[in-house]
Amino acid sequence: MSAPIATIDDVREAEAVIRRHISPAPLIRSYALEKELGLPVNRRVWLKDYGWTPCGSFKLMGGLNWMENNLERVGSRPVAAHSSGNFASGIAFAGIRYEKRVIIVMPETAPKVKFELTRSFNAEIRTYDISRDHETGERERLTREIAEVEGAIQAHPYNDPFVIAGNGVGGLEI
């Protein structure tokens, strides 16, 4: 199975989607890191500050772009995805913006703050035991089961060209 490809044109199209929802993340120079790394005076360290976004992560952009480009497929059906937190909150935020029901499969050991943020965007959360997932495939099975039983459309957190293009918008900002 080959990996999905997102072109620079896909990223540019995603930028128009993203701008309807959030502003570009600031690019901040880190003098402290430059000093800590012992860089010469002509070298710079720049950080993209996604902490200001509703989800605190660039994964929000992938979620927004996925939702925009799958609206027709989703229709009135729910969206199901698996994530440990950043894509979970990103696709949940997209669900609010596009008025879609979102169901997230998260490991029961995910940080409490990730659960709280994802729930704050009205997502339903189903948990699984991550410690044996490499043997059982419970995460994928549970996500597929939600799709089958509840008629949900699956959003993949990283192996999808719309998610990749949306996340790539940060590169254009730089």
Image (cartoon, rainbow, N blue to C red):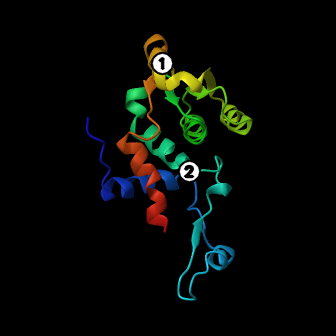
Label for residue 21?
2
Residue type at mark 1 is: Thr
Which residue is located at x 26 percent, y 39 percent? 2
Residue 126, position in %: x, y? Answer: 61, 21
- Above or below residue 144? Residue 123 is below
Extreme top residue here?
149
Extreme left residue here?
1
Secondary structure beneath label 1? helix
| CB contact under 8 Å: marks 2 and 1 | no
Which residue is located at x 30 percent, y 42 percent? 3
Residue 7, position in %: x, y? Answer: 30, 54
Mark 2 surroundings: few (<14), some (14-19) or many (≥20) residues within 10 A = few
Which residue is located at x 62 percent, y 22 percent? 127
Label for residue 136?
1
Which residue is located at x 43 percent, y 44 percent? 163
Residue 69, position in %: x, y? Answer: 39, 40
Can residue 153 be seen in the rendering of this structure? yes
Residue type at mark 2 is: His
Camera-side residue: 29 or 80?
29
Label for residue 102?
none
Left or right: residue 9 versus residue 52 is: left
Q: How many marks?
A: 2
Mark 1 surroundings: few (<14), some (14-19) or many (≥20) residues within 10 A = few
